[in-house]
Amino acid sequence: MSVAATPVASTMTDPVLALEGLCVTAPSANGPPVRIVDQVDLALYPGERVAMVGESGSGKSATARAILRLDSELTIGGRILLRGRDLVGLSEREMTRVRGREVAMVFQNPMGALDPLMTIGAQVAEPLRRAGNSRPAAWERAQHLLSEMGVPDAARRMRAYPHEFSGGMRQRVVLAMALAGDPAVLLADEPTTALDVRTQEQVLTMLDKVARDRHLSVLLITHDLATVAGFADRVVVMYAGRVVHTDPVDAVFAQPAHPYTRGLLEALPRIDQAVGRLRGIEGTAPHPADRPPGCVFEPRCPKRMAICAGERPAFVALPSGGTVACYLFSDAQAADPSATAPDRPATAPEPSAEEAEPADALSEPRVGE
Amino acid sequence: MTLLDVHGLRKVYHSLGRPPVVALDGLFLQVRAGGITGLVGESGSGKSTTIRCILGLDQPDEGWIDYDGIRLTEAGKLERRRLHREIQVVFQDPTGSLNPRMTAGQLIGEGLRVHRLRTTSASLRQRVLELMALVGLDQRDVDRYPRSFSGGQRQRIAIARALAVEPTLLICDEAVSALDVSVQAQILTLLQDMRDQLGLTVLFVAHDLAVVRQICSRVAILQAGRIVEEGDSAAVFAHPEHPYTRELLEAVPIADPARARARAAQRLAALSGAKPSPQETSA
């Protein structure tokens, strides 16, 4: 994404996946539609691992699901460029060819992705069959994939049903299914959250291995910053449907630029250091239907200034190579009005979304719990 | 002083056509008054069964539980009534434990009515409002229903409800596991405050070692229905004795990229059977 685009893990190439001004709007039963993802820019480079962090309702999952267009009732705006091709205009039929083959996704709850009445083998082989493999070839490849994901005794276990697998094993099965189509991009939505700590570590290590072996680009969505410390190259912090900060992983932990990122880290109980009391963040996140007009974090921000309530802050480049949308870091470059041009070059700062907010500016932000 | 003494608890669950499940296999646990004791275990280790036995929702097959000089497993009706007030519990999912047809005020005040701790509606309401302030809820929300609260706020209602009857022992069953980190931090701080201000004793059952380390003075590690290690929390985390404790600790994610990467490289190497090269650590 703009200045933050400098990939950590790869050389300067084109991103495999780029979101430009992605907006996701949900219909609302009583009232105007709600924009749950608001002008998100993101670039994912070949072989890069980006962690998307934020609390529940911040729009992480909605962003990932929008990439594959999994929810037909949502309206998607902006551009989703997969190797330069915009997915937003594709027909459902064309999207079917993207899902699984170019971009695959795994979810927090593997049981939701597995058919309880089908054997594991049949489920892993299914996408391979659909891709045109013969039955025996698909079966053999499925077995190979399961072994690769560390399912012991795969040949025999393929005849078992999902309920006979443990949570960690199910997640491996789902990973095998996701990789069956040989995708270039893997979207992993809280894949280890529901697992026990040791299983969590095993699944993450497996993900690490296959991402490396296959040169996958991974977008790992999680609410737990500690999980991504050893996995991600770059961290994207989302808050109330917007990206507020993105930075290489080391910079995020060493010097969290955005006050929200800092708040997240200070709220995190740590196994490697003791503090008397966790700091936490006062209050609660605003509902996407009533984002504050200025910085979305302003009502809760310990460092808020008068300017923060005014207009949405533009992105500012950080020395670390990241970008942050925060007035603490404002500089002349970020205030440049030309930066709001829609077809900005890849090196321009983010646009400020001044005209994007009429509905959001109507209501007062809710403060405090 | 030991407030809760769990002695040699054994519980086997039988189900038709399946081998019996030994949920608790000789569990010994002591909870000291005025502190927060952590009970850590993975899923299936017997955490929930332990809680169910303490609450009297399940009867152990062997062993006994003493609470403040009362043998829970043999308590009579009157004693039970007292215990139901003194031992309170907060569960993981506040949505499941709050009646959706009751307002926050009714939910928090229910225990006060049942135990006849406040007899006039004015004094009941007064106490409910005090409790809401105590746990950081907005008093204006007293007549709202659980659905209009966020997950963190619902958990506060559950805590206020538990604290309403002035319990001596609060059992938290994964009470912060489902919460966002910022809310989790608020609830953990709240529990620390309750311990310091009210002298509350807490049995904090959780699987997250980082959270347990943060607030527990003592910790017990549960594996397959038995305590494998118990002690002062600082000591156990600094020098884990049991291999299982060590294994658990090593699996906890470290929020330090350099160390976390080094460890990830080790695991990766272990997985592929090769030795980690120094370059691998900067992946």
Image: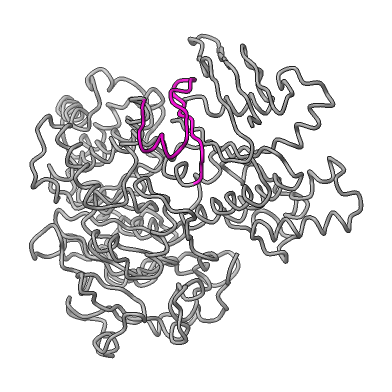
Of residues A161 and B269, the one nearer the viewer is: B269
* Percent of width and height locating residue A203: 29, 37
State the image coordinates of residue B12 (x, y, percent, origin top left): 56, 13
Which residue is outermost to the right?
Answer: B120
Verify whether residue A168 appears in magenta. no
Percent x, y of residue B86: 74, 36
Find residue B244 and report its image quarter.
top left
Which residue lies at the image location 34% right of the left edge and 47% below the top edge? A272
Q: Which residues are magenta?
A: B215-241
At x 51%, y 81%, the residue is A361
Q: Is residue B147 left or right of residue A158?
A: right
Side (left or right) of B160 relative to B212: right
- Percent across and percent down for residue B39 are 51, 33
**Quadrant hosting residue A89:** bottom left
Residue at the front extreme, as displayed: B1
Looking at the image, residue A279 lies above or below residue B173: below
Residue at position x 56%, y 25% in the image = B29
The quadrant holding residue B81 is top right
Q: Nearer the viewer, residue B69 or B275?
A: B69
Residue situated in front as seen by the camera: B250 or B60: B250
Left or right: where does residue B91 sit relative to residue A138? right
| Residue depicted at 52% across the width and 67% down the height | A287
